[in-house]
Amino acid sequence: MVLNNPRISPGHVKAGTFVNDVADGSQVITGVGFAPAFLIIGSAGNLPVIVIYDGTIQVGQKAAATVIIDVLDPQTDGSNRIRGNMASLDADGFTITWSSLVGTAPARTFFYLAVAK
């Protein structure tokens, strides 16, 4: 990802949090206030996740192809697992499609930093 102009105008950056609230299906995150040009998504805990996504390419730990988040339950042997795929960058946020891989995945809080053009 190349940032040709690193200056970002006020009001074009939004930080927030969300909890993966669906076991299978789409989760729409709104309230950003603009269409993001790219996102940084992360989480803390026993299995941290850090991903940068620009609508096409994503890079970072736990990122491969369109998989942005692979959540394991740290309290088990990994038998509870959910995966999040980036579906879209939207006019007022973004959408993630979750799918349970095994068992009942844990709810987990994620942070995001959305940046507009």
Image (cartoon, helix red, strand yellow):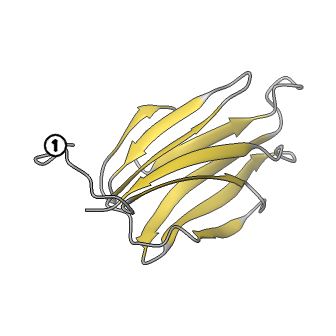
Q: Residue pushed farthest bottom?
A: 91
Inspect this view and state whether residue 98 appears.
yes
Q: Which quadrant of the rendered structure holds the C terminus?
A: bottom left
Q: Which residue sits at x=38%, y=71%?
A: 35
Vertically, is 60 above or below 23?
Answer: above
Task: State the residue in front, 81 or 30.
Answer: 30
Q: Type of residue at label 1?
A: Val
Binning the other alpha carbons within 10 Å of mark 1 as few (below 14), some (14 to 19) or many (20 upward) gives: few
At x 58%, y 72%, the residue is 30
Q: Is residue 114 above or below residue 97?
A: above
- In this rendering, the answer to whether 12 lies above or below 91 is above
- 10 to the left or right of 40: left
Quarter of image, res 48 = top right
Mark 1 element type: loop
Q: Is residue 10 left or right of residue 102?
A: left
Q: In the rendered image, which quarter contains the N terminus?
A: top left
Expressed as whole percent of the image width and height from the top left, the position of residue 39 reads 42, 51
Furthest-front residue in this view: 10
For the point 83% across and 38% down, the residue is 80
Nearer to us in this view, 114 or 81 = 114
Towards the viewer: 25 or 88: 88
Q: Which residue is mark 1?
A: 2
Q: How many marks?
A: 1
Please state the horizontal and vertical placement of residue 108, each as a whole percent of the image.
76, 43
Q: Position of residue 20 (x, y in %)?
A: 73, 54
Residue 82 located left or right of residue 96: right
Find residue 10 and report its image quarter.
Answer: bottom left
Which x, y percent locates residue 86? 49, 58
Q: Is residue 63 visible?
A: no
When the figure is inspected, residue 116 is found, relative to residue 79, above or below; the finding is below
